[in-house]
Image (cartoon, rainbow, N blue to C red):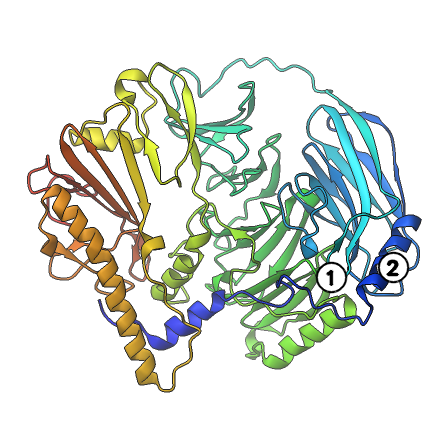
Amino acid sequence: MSRFSLTMLAATLALFLPALSAQAAAYGLRSDLSCEARVGVTNRLAGETRVSLSGNSLDVGERLSIDWARPGFPEREPIFLMVSFDRPVRLSGDGMYALLPGAKAPFDISWNRDRTRAIIPYYGRGMAKSGRIAVEPLQSGPLQVDWAVLGHSGCDEHVETPGQGNATVTIATAGRPVIVVRDRVTGAAPSSTLVNRDGTRHLQVFDGRFRLTDAATGAEIMEKVGAPHFSPAGRYVVLPGGDEAGIYDAVDGKRVVDAQDGFQVNSDWSALIWSHDDSFALQILSGYGFSQFHNFAAGRTVQATTNGCRICGGNKNRYLLELENNAFVAEGYNEMAVFRLSDGDETYRFRPELGDGARVQPSHRNAALQEIGRQQAVVEPAIGIGLRYSTEVAIARAFPTHFSQSYQSKENQIISEALAPYLVTPRKLEAVAGGGIAPRGLSSSALAWRSLGADAPGAADRMFKRLREFGLPVVAGEVVERIDVDERLPSYDARKQYATPAERLAAQDLHDLRVTDAFRKFWTEIAAATGVDVTRFGRRMSLTSCSAANDKLLGDFHTLWRWSSGGAEHRLTTFQCHEGSAAFAYPTTYLFSSNLSGAFRNLNNPGGSRPA
């Protein structure tokens, strides 16, 4: 494999180093108060904060108002009013942001982490002393509402505060019954069924259409054209392409963000980077360097970057989400902005005219840091580097390598690979012998395949169909092991400093040899099990290539599947790759089997045994 470009590899991988400020276990608070003094300030504010609800009953679709007010707060300490809800809700209101169940709160405050929470930071210049939260309940039944003023003392979280309250609001169903005259997706079993993380929602995928259903009752929530997927934590449905493209709330099917028309949008919606269990989403667009930052549960979207060149993608921008400082930072190549997270307002922006040649300089970053410190910081702020904009990021689809035309595809590949460890593999339902379905996570180390063709006609997934096309038996109870090869490859530390460029090049060459040795262990195992000639394997010609040199089998692969059946050994390798200035997709899937003549088939070119 050819040597990577030293400058590009080091510079691009550096984009993904996490910002360490405000994310260590011990938070370095800026004030000089002792832990005991901060507890006293928190208790004073907790005892004097007032919270009231507009009622104790309403219908689904109506809104509950929660009014709050606090006393003066001259100190700048990490103190918050938090309001939690034990059922799904959508919130809105200035002075707050929303965290979904399971999300890490600022300073890792653990209070009611398993519920949706409205977070109202008390600290910072110009912060309101009173406000209103509008609550839209999404399900009928009793809604438990709890509130508390909480903080961090600098030594530990402080959650045993005075003045905590709660109320139960009765939510009644107000919708009128609907008679479905024509269901366009019934009459056949779905080709596959995805299930969200908590198991409450199913996505039944048919030929060209899909249906979102309640897992417990089977009730249809939404039915549209397209091929959707769930967000990493399963709260949202992402629908790429088409007139109805966008992001929908999986609870009730409501669209929470529309598709953008024209070249500005990444058409496959792969460039979504989620954080804090779906609480936030960074949406990278493919034109003018545009990007948007969403807090869907709070009904808020900010235009993070807007000032790139016509074909510039936002995948080269820098971002940072700092809950501790109530800030979101976005930097493009010629713009920089700081937003207050709790209301979306800009507190700093550098944005010159596009044609004047100005670029972001260290002085602009320093100015942004100073403004965060002046306005709202309770810990020392940092500037974001790269698309890993928090320690909690996750992606539901691989970040696209064809994303931006303005940078070499090698750089796009590195960006995609750097985000790959945060990919959350979807769960799907699997037909089982004797009827019925069972959930399984595709990321598990082993999964049991059943004889779907005999037991559940029409419900076989695509992988099963492809295997049957090549005459391979899939026997009930046989175990198919899935190996994430990328997790077993040696990592390269781009942060390490070297005395000379020659030493760095030598280290890169050594790393490349170690990666090849790691792949060779897989090649040797495949050859021993299936009889394929181990010398047929080879590495990619370069990072931007999707093929091996000298007519070799492509030995780079992301995933390896292996199983035994009927006395034969079978191996399947898959690799996703994009090549060329147009970034055409060249996926490579090889099937190795001791039952096959020549021991392998290229499933992208099943007519012959030679690689494509």
Please tell me the numbered disc located at residue 41. 2
As drawn, 447 above or below 553: above
Question: Mark 1 sits on what residue?
Answer: 155
User: Which one is nearer the viewer's eye here, 153 or 122?
Assistant: 153
Please tell me which of labels 2 and 1 falls first in the chain: 2
The x, y position of residue 234, in whole percent, is 54, 38
Q: Residue at 72% x, 69% y: name it.
A: 372
User: Which one is nearer the viewer's eye here, 514 or 426?
Assistant: 514
Most extreme residue toward the left is: 597
Q: Is mark 2 on a helix, strand or loop?
A: helix
Asked whether the beta carbons under mark 2 and mark 1 sit within 8 Å of each other, the answer is: no
Three-letter residue code for mark 2: Val
Three-letter residue code for mark 1: Cys
Q: In which quarter of the image is the N terminus?
A: bottom left
Q: In which quarter of the image is residue 175?
A: top right
Whole-angstrom CA distance, mark 2 to mark 1, is: 14 Å
The x, y position of residue 286, in whole percent, is 48, 57
User: Which one is nearer the viewer's eye here, 241 or 53?
Assistant: 53
Q: In this view, does 218 lie to the left or right of 600?
A: right
Local packing at callout 2 (Cα closer than 10 Å; few below 14, some 14-19, many 20+) is some
Q: Is residue 36 left or right of residue 109?
A: right
